[in-house]
Image (tube, helix red, strand yellow):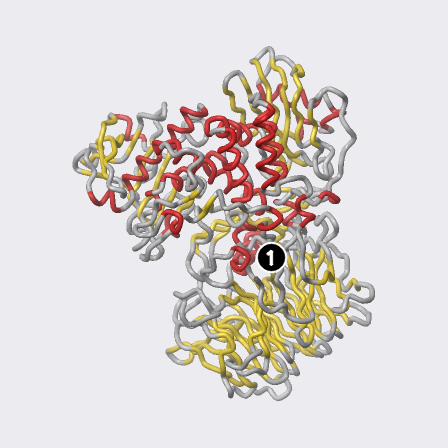
């Protein structure tokens, strides 16, 4: 399934389907992509049916114009999702349902003028998917969907690659909450069960809140992304300890003061809390209701404690007098409270918006959170509150920057308007709009002119010693364009580029602000966000939304041309994706899948693929690595998801996800029947084959990892390693009758951790190298002479070691040490007889291209210090490179996302250095 096509809907021009032009009348109609409903209609003044609510009038209007909108039954298939009114205008958002089931991102907007009896429709926009025909009866139950979702998140976050459990500790997993059925609007539609997985990550303990969609017929995870909206690139209730407490009603607001982290004294709206005998940072002077703008003391809390549900035991920051002292300053509480009021005032005064939701919701800021007691340099909006990190020796608490506070609060505004899905292009658009308003608010508060060369910097006021430009986390004036800077990548990296690609669109908006003026451009962007944009919009749709909003506001022609120039200068023009180039050879286009790896060996490759729309369950295909000859379909079309194939050039082995569990299947490349080798409930992600030997990992009851190996000729005779309470095994690889894997087991009162190789024919199980306590052991690869593996024995420096040893355990060397020049943060590897290739990040790089997963190759038999051992980059493609599989010699196949779609590509030799 093409996740990119789902959440990054701006497809190349050749992929768009255009509809029959509607009847004459509108000044502009932009056809929808792969739907008969137009994406935007403007320049109309058409009477809406009289009477009833705004939503009823909007649906009746659409129903009366079937020839243009092609929505068969708006009353049945469009559910009111909110109406906003301002200056005589009404904007109605309608959520699409398919046979009663919500459609992800299916939202249509109707804009009207007038009131109850005389409404005139002035335009429409959004996404209504006319091609949906999927059934809505699930075959997968909630319990299995939650189990599969949690397992998918653990694999995505790295638990499937490295052991993150220290000896003597118990493993723990995030939890899942079922959210109901959702149709993904891909092709004819994919019925899924939506599960929110929340808790702490398996490696660094980072907060987890991921939205996962499980195919409701086969139980395969077809989409997942993070719902936590951070500032930087990663990293109404009644209870007394929660915001909005009823006991506040008797207390009056007072004027207090405090000192910000930059040394300035500011006034603060505070309130005396008689229960505590303290003045607290609680402001009820702004929101015209019993809600409040409050700042909470989260010192001593880890950021994993506060993401998601309201944490127990929090209290608003207090002081014995209205003048808040040093603790409130040092924690960032004064800055957070003061800045939150300024952001509220900006949206109220400039745009008439009452709080983040437009309806006077409470605004809650948490300050002082740490990373397990260590400094936390980040901030995030989690759907109900802002959370600001403690900062460190260089960076002040994150609330010290007005643009950071404005950015996080704008995420709240976005969530209650366009609700842009936080992944891919729509996620980058989400970040771009948050960046824009964060900087706009800072410029408004401090009187910074749009012509100031540093006006586009974000977070530049956070540092104690660095200059603003050195300190800034992003720059809206960085000049990035789609042609030179867009990074195609999967959702495992920065949620599909939400930060890495954001300044392309944000920069266009900021450039236009200088040309059109701050007040005019702010109004344009706010109207585009609140009245035009919808959840799955990408750059192209958002460009149209901004231009349409400018037209509504009667911006003169010169200003509209300036807007168009700004978008063109940043490469945001229809069909821009088709201009992205690569240095690799294409083997399979548009695989349209998620969460599945490649296999290769013996001159062949194998991959999972969906249909052109990405709506069909995945099938396994195989082809020759030289690109010659036809592709071969290996798996049956039986409604299951066939994933994670491996091949040795003679046989293809893979996993098949179904409602009753997961099978490991095999089939000869030369043809013949599919053979079932194994059946289980919860698989891992590693499968390997060499000759008659197959090895794979899986999870036993209680989440305990195990490695199994078997003979294709005699699959009933399965040998299992690990899977017990005190014995875990993971990361298998096979070659020449041997299985390499990682192991952790308790021996007497201690735990033994190490890399091992078992000779299947003789039964000899040899320890290659024992690991020290606290070492995380990662994937293995094995060939006829050596075993290779990744390890991390210093979790603080963000790098890993690539280690090699002979099959008898001798000659242990580090091909890529964990420290020193060229150290890599590697997470996956594959080996041929001649080379070993790792998927890795370059740590702490300032080059955006190099901050994505790339492939690095080494000579398998070389001396670590010998010239030519480190062969360099496999490819210089700009986008994400993942799931590498060695063919032979230096040839590797991999999944490449440079063009914005995922393709199977190859190179026969490494590119070396990339400029």
Quadrant for the C terminus in the image: bottom right
**Viewer-nearest residue: 517 or 178:** 517
In the figure, 82 relative to 540: above or below?
Answer: above
Report the side of 747 relative to 152 (left or right).
Answer: left
Q: Is residue 422 left or right of residue 17?
A: left
615 or 150: nearer the viewer: 615
Look at the picture and state if 692 lies above or below 110.
below
Which quadrant would residue 438 be assigned to in this image?
top left
Residue 729 position in % (x across, y down): 52, 73
User: Quadrant of residue 914 in the image?
Assistant: bottom right
Residue found at x 77% / y 22%: 23
Helix, strand or loop at label 1? It is: loop
Residue denoted by label 1? 878
Relative to residue 563, is residue 467 drawn left or right?
left
Residue closest to the eye, 376 or 458: 458
> Residue placed at 74% from the left, 44% from the top?
15
Q: Is residue 622 above or below residue 866?
A: above
**Place of residue 601 in the rendered image (x, y in percent of width and height, measured from the top left):** 70, 73
From the top left corner, tell me how far across and down residue 227 is, in percent.
Answer: 50, 46
Is 735 left, or right, of 84 in this rendering?
Answer: right
Q: Foreground residue, 768 or 191?
A: 768
Residue 698 visible here: no
Measuring from the top left, give residue 131's x and y in whole percent.
Answer: 73, 38
């Amino acid at each position: 399934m093409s996740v990119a096509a789902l959440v990054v809907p701006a497809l190349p021009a050749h992929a768009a389907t255009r509809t029959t032009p509607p009847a004459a009348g509108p000044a502009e109609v932009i056809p929808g992509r792969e739907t008969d409903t137009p994406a935007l209609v403007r320049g109309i003044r058409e009477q809406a049916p009289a009477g009833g609510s705004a939503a009823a009038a909007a649906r009746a209007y659409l129903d009366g114009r079937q020839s243009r909108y092609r929505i068969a039954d708006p009353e049945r298939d469009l559910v009111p999702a909110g109406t906003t009114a301002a200056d005589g205008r009404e904007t109605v958002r309608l959520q699409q349902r398919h046979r009663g089931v919500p459609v992800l991102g299916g939202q249509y907007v109707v804009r009207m003028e007038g009131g109850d009896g005389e409404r005139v429709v002035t335009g429409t926009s959004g996404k209504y998917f006319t091609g949906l025909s999927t059934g809505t009866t699930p075959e997968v139950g909630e319990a299995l969907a939650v189990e599969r979702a949690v397992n998918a998140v653990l694999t995505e976050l790295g638990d499937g690659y490295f052991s993150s459990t220290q000896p003597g500790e118990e493993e723990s997993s995030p939890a899942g909450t079922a959210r109901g059925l959702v149709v993904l609007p891909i092709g004819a539609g994919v019925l899924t069960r939506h599960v929110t997985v929340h808790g702490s990550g398996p490696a660094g303990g980072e907060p987890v809140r991921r939205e996962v969609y499980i195919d409701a017929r086969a139980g395969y995870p077809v989409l997942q992304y993070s719902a936590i909206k951070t500032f930087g690139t990663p990293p109404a209730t009644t209870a007394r300890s929660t915001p909005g407490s009823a006991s506040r009603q008797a207390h009056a607001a007072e004027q207090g003061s405090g000192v910000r982290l930059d040394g300035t004294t500011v006034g603060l709206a505070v309130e005396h809390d008689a229960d505590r005998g303290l003045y607290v940072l609680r402001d009820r002077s702004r929101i015209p209701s019993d809600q409040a703008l409050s700042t909470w003391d989260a010192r001593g809390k880890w950021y994993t404690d506060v993401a998601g549900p309201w944490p127990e035991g929090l209290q608003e920051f207090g002081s014995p007098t209205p003048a808040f002292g040093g603790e409130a300053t040092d924690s960032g509480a004064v800055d957070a409270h003061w800045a939150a009021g300024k952001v509220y005032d900006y949206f109220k005064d400039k745009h008439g918006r009452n709080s983040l939701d437009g309806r006077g919701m409470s605004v809650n800021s948490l300050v002082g959170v740490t990373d397990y007691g260590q400094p936390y340099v980040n901030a995030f909006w989690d759907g109900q509150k802002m959370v600001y990190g403690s900062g460190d020796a260089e960076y002040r608490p994150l609330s010290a920057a007005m643009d950071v506070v404005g950015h996080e609060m704008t995420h709240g505004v976005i969530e209650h308007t366009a609700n842009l899905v936080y992944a891919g292009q729509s996620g980058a658009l989400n970040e771009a709009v948050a960046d824009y308003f964060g900087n706009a608010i800072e410029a408004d508060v401090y009187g910074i002119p749009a012509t100031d060369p540093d006006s586009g910097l974000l977070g530049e006021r956070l540092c104690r010693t660095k200059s603003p430009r050195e300190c800034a986390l992003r720059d809206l004036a960085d000049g990035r364009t789609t042609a030179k800077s867009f990074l195609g990548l999967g959702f495992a990296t920065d949620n599909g580029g939400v930060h890495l690609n954001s300044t392309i669109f944000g920069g266009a908006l900021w450039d236009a602000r200088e040309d059109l003026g701050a007040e005019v451009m702010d109004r344009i962007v706010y109207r585009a966000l609140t009245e035009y944009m919808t959840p799955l919009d990408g750059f192209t749709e958002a460009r149209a939304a901004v231009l349409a909003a400018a037209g509504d506001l009667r911006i003169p022609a010169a200003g509209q041309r300036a807007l168009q120039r700004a978008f063109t200068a940043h490469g945001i023009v229809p069909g821009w994706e088709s201009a992205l180039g690569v240095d690799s050879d294409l083997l399979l286009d548009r695989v349209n899948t998620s969460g599945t790896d490649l296999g290769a060996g013996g001159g062949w490759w194998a991959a999972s693929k969906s249909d052109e729309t990405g709506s069909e369950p995945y099938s396994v295909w195989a082809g020759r690595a030289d690109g010659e000859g036809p592709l071969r379909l290996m798996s049956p079309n039986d409604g299951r998801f066939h994933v994670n194939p491996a091949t040795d050039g003679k046989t293809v082995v893979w996993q098949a996800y179904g409602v009753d569990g997961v099978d490991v299947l095999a089939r000869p490349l030369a043809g013949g029947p599919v053979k079932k080798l194994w059946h289980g409930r919860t698989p891992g992600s590693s499968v390997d084959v060499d000759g008659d030997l197959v090895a794979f990992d899986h999870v036993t009851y209680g989440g305990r990892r195990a490695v199994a190996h078997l003979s294709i000729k005699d699959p009933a005779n399965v040998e299992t390693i690990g899977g017990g309470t005190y014995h875990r095994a993971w990361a298998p690889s096979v070659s020449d009758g041997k299985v390499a894997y990682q192991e952790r087991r308790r021996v007497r009162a201690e735990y033994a951790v190490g890399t091992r190789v078992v000779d299947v024919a003789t039964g000899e199980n040899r320890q290659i190298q024992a690991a020290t306590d606290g070492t995380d052991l990662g994937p293995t690869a094995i060939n006829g002479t050596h075993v290779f593996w990744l390890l991390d024995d210093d979790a603080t420096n963000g790098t890993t070691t690539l280690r090699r040893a002979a099959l008898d355990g001798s000659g242990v060397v580090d091909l890529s040490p964990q420290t020193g020049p060229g150290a890599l943060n590697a997470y996956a590897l594959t080996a041929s007889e001649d080379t070993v290739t790792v998927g890795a990040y370059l740590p702490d790089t300032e080059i955006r291209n190099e901050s994505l997963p790339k492939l690095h190759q080494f000579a398998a038999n070389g001396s670590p210090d010998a010239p030519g051992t480190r062969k360099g980059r496999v490819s210089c493609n700009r986008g994400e490179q993942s799931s590498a599989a060695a063919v032979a010699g230096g040839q590797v196949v991999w999944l490449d996302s440079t063009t914005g779609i995922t393709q199977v590509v190859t190179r026969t030799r490494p590119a070396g250095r990339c400029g």
